[in-house]
Amino acid sequence: MTDSQKRILVLGVGNILFTDEGIGVSAADQIMSRYELSDNVTVMDGGTLGTRLMDPMMNCDLVIVIDAVLGDGPAGSIYRLTGEDLRKSLAFKDSMHQTDLVDTLIMCEIVGTRPEAVIIGMEPLDYHTLNVGISDVAKERQEALIGFVLEEVVKAGGSYSLKANPSSITQEREPCA
Amino acid sequence: MAPKTPQSNFSGPVVVDPVTRIEGHLRIDATVENGKIVDVRSSSQLFRGLEIILKGRDPRDAQHFTQRACGVCTYVHALCSTRAVDNAVKVKIPKNATIMRNLVMGSQYLHDHLVHFYHLHALDWVNVANALQADPVKTAALSNSLSPNRKETADQFKAVQTKVKALVDSGKLGIFTNAYFLGEKKNEAYYLPAEADLMAVKHYLDALHMQVKAARAMAIFGAKNPHTQFTVVGGVTNYDALKPDRIAEYKALTDEVIAFIKDFYIPDLLAVASFYKDWAGIGGTSNFISFGEFPTDEYNLDSRFFAPGVIMKRDLAKVASMDQKKIEEHVKHSWYVGDKAHHPYNGVTEPKYTKLEDKDRYSWMKAPRYNGEACETGPLATVLVAFAKGHKPTVDAVKFVLNYLKVDASALFSTLGRTAARGIECLVTANQMQVWLDALVGNVKGGDTELYTPWKMPNEAEGVGFVQAPRGALSHWIKIKKGKIENFQLVVPSTWSLGPRCAAGKLGPVEEALMGTPIFDPHRPVEILRTVHSFDPCIACGVHVLDAKTGKTSSFKVL
C-alpha cells in the first residue's frame, strides 16, 4: 500500500438477531469469506457497536457502511446514501443504542479525524422479527448489494478478486472431545 | 453556603420517554407532589425474547447469539454463556484461561466506566453551554490543582471553547441533544462554576481518545475486533495473545488508560461530587446483590477478587453469601402471562402486552428478586460487599473518597455514592490488572501455555454462569437435553436494578431510588436523569424487539 492510497473500511452493521437488520453484517461476512481484497481495504462486522467503532473508523479515509435502509422503495431496493441522507440508514437513526453512527462520526470529527462516509444499503422486508438469517427477498438481492459495495471499493482505489477457496462463514468450533 | 439543588412546588405528572444516552428504551413515569416524586414506574418498552431463538441450538453457539443482544456488553454475554456451559459440562479450565478472561473483563470495566462517566453521565452534572463563560486561565489553574500529573494550559482550554462554540454554531449538537442544560433559561439545577464545566468538557473530549485505546487493548486479547471471539467452553483460544509483543502492546495501552483514570477520571469525579454533595442524600436504595468478579478458580465464587454477596437493609455488618436458589423472576406487573414467580432454570417467557398507560402491568422487564427482596446491582453493590467484607484495596479506596468529600459511609447509599462507587470499582480493578498480567507472564515463562481443556457434551445437564458485568449481576441459565439447548434464560443486571414491582408490590430499585427526588423544572427533569443514569441502564439485552402495539414505531419512520 502506498501513502497516496485511500484506506477503505467496509463496515457491515446491524443486529443479526432481527432478520433483515442483519443485512449489513451478512453481506460483510460474505465478502470476507469469498473475496480477496487489496491491502488498503479492511472488511469488518461492526454489529451494533457505537463508540467502540471509533478506532477502526478513525483509521480509514473512507468508510463504506452496509446496512438496512428505510427509503421509500419496495423491499430489496438498494440505495447509495451520502451526506444528510445518512440518517435513513437504520444504524444512523436515533437508534436504541447509546450512540448511533452519526454521533460516532461526529465524535470522530471532534477528536480529529472523520472519514468520508457512504452507505450502500437495502430496504428490509422485516427488521422486527427475532430471527437469525435474512429474508428471502434480501437473500435474492444480496449479490447485487455486494456488487455495489465492491464497485464502491474500486471507485475509491481498492481492488478485489475471488478467492480460490472461499473460507467458511460459520463460526469456528472448538474441538469437542 | 454551597449551592443546593433548587426546589419547586410543582405538582403533576413527569414522564421521561425515552431516557436517552442509555442502551435500549426506558420510560420513567413519575407523579410529583409539591416538588417531590411521590410515585414512579420504571418501564422498559422493548420486548425480550432471546430465549426463544436459542432453543434447540448447540449449547456452544449460545454465546454467538447472546453477545449480539447488546451494542455495549458483547463480551460479558459471551463470557456468561460460556461459563454457563462450562458449568453444565463440568470442565475445569486452565489457570491461564481464567487470567485471560479476567484481563479482557478488566479492559471492559475500564472502557465502560470511563465512557459512562464522561459520555453518558457527565451531561447530567456539567453544563456544556456554560463552559463558554469560563476563564481559561482560571480553568487551567483549577485543573492542575487536582492532580500533580496534570500539565494543562489556558491555551488548551481556550481551544476547547472554540471547538464547542463551532459545534453549537454548526448545529451538530447531536451528542448533546436532549441534555437538560439546553433551553432559553439557564437550568438552575446545574450549578458547577463555569471553570469546572469547561474542565469537564475538555476531559470529555480527552476521554473520547482514551476510550479508543481501552477498546483497542480489549481487542488485542479479544482476538476479533470489535467483537471478542476468544472464549470457548473449556477455556480460551487466543494463543496469539501469549506472545511477548502482544502482551507488551496490551500493557502499553492499558497503562495509558490506567494513568488517565488516576490522573483525570477519579480527580474529576471527586471535584464534581464536591459541588453536588447534597446528592449524597438523594437516590439511595436498601438492598444489594453482587455476584463478584475476577475469579482465580472458576468453580469457586468466593475466589473472586471482588467477593459475591448480598446486603439487606443497608446493614454493612451482615453480608450474606449469595445462594442462587433464592433468585426468582416475577411477572405480576410485567407484560407476561400470569403472576407466578419462577427460578430462572424454570423461567417462562410468554408475552402478553396490555397498554402503555397501564399502571398495573407496565414493563417488558421481569422483576428479579432475591429472597423476595428487590436488590440493586452494579458497582455500588460490588463496592459495598467488598468494603463490608474488608477487601483491603476497596476499603482503602472507599476511605480515600469519603475523606476527600468529608462524608461518612452512609453517603454511599445515594446517587452520588453510586457514581463514586463506579469510579472506585474502576480504580481498584485497574490496580489489579498488572497483578494478573504478571501472573500470566510468569506462567508463560515457566512453560505453562495451556489455555484449553477438552470436554465432552453430556446428553442432559444444567448449568449457570455468573458474571459481575460493569452494570452488575448477570446470569445465564442453561438446560441441555440430547446435547441441545432445552431452555435458556438470561437474568440481566438492568432487570435487577430497573425492573418493575414484584408480586408483593415491592418497588424495583430505581423506583425506590427516585421516590422523594426533588423536581425543579418539570420540563427539564435532570434530577430524574441523574439517578437513572447513575445505574448505567443497559436494557437492550433485558428486552429487545420494538413492539408495534405501543405505537412507538414512529421513531423508525423515514425522516
Image (cartoon, grey):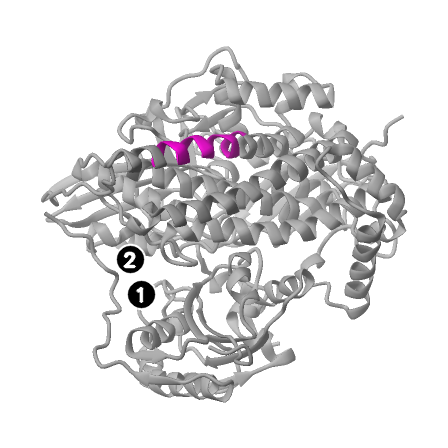
In the image, B171 versus B211, the foreground residue is B211
Residue identified by numbered label 1: A132
- Does A120 appear above or below B494? below
* In front: label 2 or label 1: 1
Chain letter of disc 2 in the image: B
- The amino acid type of the residue labelled 2 equals Ile
Residue identified by numbered label 2: B53
Horizontal arrangement in the rendering, residue B412 relative to residue B158 (left or right) = left
In the image, B65 versus B194, the foreground residue is B194
| Residue B145, picture quadrant | top right
Where is the C terminus of chain B found, in terms of image quarters? bottom right
- Does A26 appear above or below B192? below
Secondary element at image label 1: loop
Image coordinates of residue A138 in percent, x first then y, are 36, 80
In the image, B360 versus B305, the foreground residue is B305
Query: Which residue is at 25% across, 54% downward?
Result: B61
Q: Give the range drawn in magenta.
A: B428-440
Q: Would residue B340 be seen by someone viewing this image from the given angle?
A: no
Magenta stretch containing residue B435, yes or no?
Answer: yes
- Does B174 appear above or below A32? above
Find the distance from the CA under tag 2 to the CA under tag 1. Answer: 8 Å
Secondary element at image label 2: helix
- Does B172 appear above or below A155? above
* Same chain, labels 2 and 1: no
Image coordinates of residue A9 in percent, x first then y, are 48, 73
Where is the N terminus of chain B found, in terms of image quarters? top right
Query: Which residue is at 51% across, 36% downward?
Result: B497
Asked if disc 2 and disc 1 are in contact, CB closer than 8 Å, the reply is: yes
| Residue A122, picture quadrant | bottom left
- The amino acid type of the residue labelled 1 equals Val
